[in-house]
Amino acid sequence: MTAQVLDGKGLAGRIEHSLRDEVETFAGMFGRRPRLVVVLVGDMAASASYVKSKAAAATRVGIDSDVIAVPETATTAELVALVQAIAADQHGPADGILVQLPLPRHVDAVAVLDAVPPDRDVDGFHPENAGLLSQGRPRFIPCTAAGVQRMLIDAAIPTAGKHVVIVGRSDIVGKPLALLLAQRPPAGCPTDGGCDATVTICHSRSGDIGHFTRQADIVVAAVGRPRLITADMVRPGATVIDVGINRVDGKLIGDVDYGPVAEKAAWISPVPGGVGPMTVAMLIANTLLAAELRMKR
Ligand code: GUN
């Protein structure tokens, strides 16, 4: 079997296209465009590159964006004060606020992220948004988790009653994705895709991860370990979603050993061009949602 490719880049382009129309409607109604403010701390090349992609996507759909770059030496107190100033619109109106991770080791990342008001938290990392998601009434869903769910729905890959094994328990991807895929279908949901799954989360203390992934209809790899998921860990006909983005010898590779796994799986997402562009598209969708919610207040 050779897997069909889950083309995240193509799907993200289609989503951006429809968001562009919604942004124009917003601008026509309110006489301004949604605006995203991103805080970038330090000079990590990968973070700078992700932030550039986010700002470029905002521009493509007609959303204003601003990147505030801060030196690596910034303290927790300075970053909290900066986020509070952004939230007070001192850097222009900010419908969505995003602090790019990771933050330098000396910074208390939780304190900085908690300073983002929950109604502008387009990353969905604030405890209020995490709590709403866990109760099945999501507001801002973390972008990568939302992107993975959207890819599954778009490809009509069933999740109801299926076993999803997520490798990685981060607050950014693993935990919110587990909640999303296991939830009941939201009221009025036009499809029954992307929910009602049986979910297992594996992590560094799970022991033999292959023991779990071999039982999966859908494997999601989200740990940041190059080629962790090998062909022997995947059952024939499974769907394999690769959230990992690792730089090895100047090349971007995922957490999945792509070539051999693609020979065995039914569906596979590539790196690059899979989940990455979907994360960005979901961020843009969350920013528009934040602006709409703000105008309703
Ligand atoms: N770093 C890696 N992924 C993310 C993300 O989704 N949001 C933020 N803010 N930082 C990240």
Image (cartoon, helix red, strand yellow):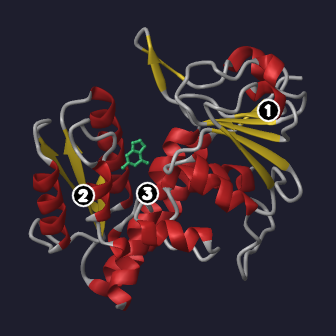
Residue visible at 50% across and 65% down in the picture: 130
How busy is the neighbourhood of tag 1: few (under 14 within 10 Å), some, or many (20 plus)?
A: many
Tag of residue 40: none
The residue that mark 2 highlights is 65
Front residue of this view, candidates 107 and 72 = 107
Please tell me which of labels 1 and 3 falls first in the chain.
1
Label 2 and label 3: CA atoms lie apart by 12 Å
SS of the residue under disc 1: helix
- Of marks 1 and 2, the one in the foreground: 1
Q: Name the image quarter holding the C terminus.
A: bottom left
Q: Nearer the viewer, residue 154 or 183?
A: 183
Residue at 71%, 54% in the rendered image: 154
**What is the three-letter code of the residue carrying label 2?**
Ser
Seen in the picture, residue 223 relative to 283 is either above or below; the reply is above
Q: Are marks 1 and 3 in contact (CB under 8 Å)?
A: no
* Residue 151 on image: x %, y %: 67, 49
In the image, the residue with mark 3 has its CB under 8 Å from the nearest atom of ligand 1: yes
Location of mark 3 (residue): 283
Q: Answer left or right for 4 relative to 92.
A: right
